[in-house]
Amino acid sequence: MKLLVTALDYDGTIARGDVLDPSVRKAIAAARTGGIVVLLVTGRILTELQRVAGDLHFVDGVIAENGAVMHFPESGRTSTLAPTVPDGFLVELRRRRIPFTAGQCLIDVDANEAPRLLDVIRTLELPLVLIFNGGRVMVAAQGVSKASGLRVAVETLRLSARNVGGRRRRERSGAPANRRSRRRRRMGQQELAGQRRRRSQRQRTSGDWLNTFGGTTSRAG
């Protein structure tokens, strides 16, 4: 199998202390020039990633919020792959004075707040899970992971999961994939056409790496 797509994690893989190494940026550019689609897969909230990494045009696509948000920098298109954070949940967090940062489909909180978060989720009977990442914990919908988001992005670009390779910071077990929609397929055709216009020749090597992406989840209830 030939390598068509490489998937890279951000923190601890291509960036240290929020900063992307210039040599890594050059390597990514060389891979794209050689015809490889480069996707960034991260648990970060998209706006936070843009704050530390810039406009993200150094990659072809981004799967943010631990698989819940898909973004294509060239076209500026962003799609949510999971339910948005319930308003009632945010209201209750504010009422209990639990500090958090909210994305479109995920909230980021200090891991020490996990017991209180679980209590809110159980009280409101919400289908949410906790995803631990070092000293932070993310709250997102069940069944969403970096793996599921990556699969949707690859399908959107009308590529095969068997042609995906990459590097990531080591994490643990994953969650099932999301189903693709006709709208995503149409968007993928447009994105892929734009990439083909930029690159006339493709040189690829073999690899199969998709299923290594995942996350540790803690279910409420």
Image: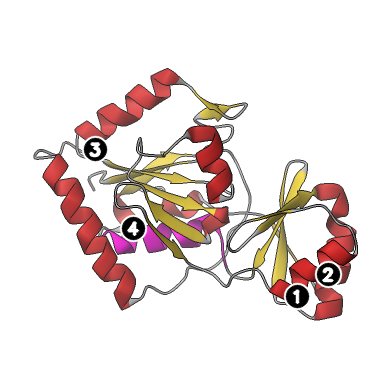
Q: Which residue, given by chain and number where applicable, does mark 2 sit on?
A: 92
N-term mark: 3 or 4: 4
Q: Which residue is depicted at the point 88% across and 69% down?
A: 119
Q: Which residue, given by chain and number where applicable, does mark 3 sit on?
A: 205
What is the spatial separation of the Cα atoms under label 3 and label 2, in whole angstroms?
Answer: 50 Å
Q: Residues within 10 Å of mark 1 (few under 14, many from 20)?
A: few
Q: Which element carries disc 3, helix, strand or loop?
A: loop
Q: Horizontal placement of 14 versus 72: left or right? A: right
Q: Nearer the viewer, mark 3 or mark 4?
A: 4
Q: State the residue in front, 168 or 87.
A: 87
Residues in magenta, as a range: 144-157
Q: State the residue in front, 199 or 57.
A: 57
Q: Nearer the viewer, mark 2 or mark 4?
A: 2
What is the spatial separation of the Cα atoms under label 1 and label 2, in whole angstroms?
Answer: 6 Å
Q: State the residue in front, 193 or 174.
A: 193
Give the percent coordinates (x, y) of residue 145. 56, 60
What is the spatial separation of the Cα atoms under label 3 and label 1, in whole angstroms?
Answer: 48 Å
Give the percent coordinates (x, y) of residue 42. 53, 46
The amino acid pointed to by label 2 is Glu
Q: Assess whether mark 2 and mark 1 are in contact (beta carbons under 8 angstroms).
A: yes
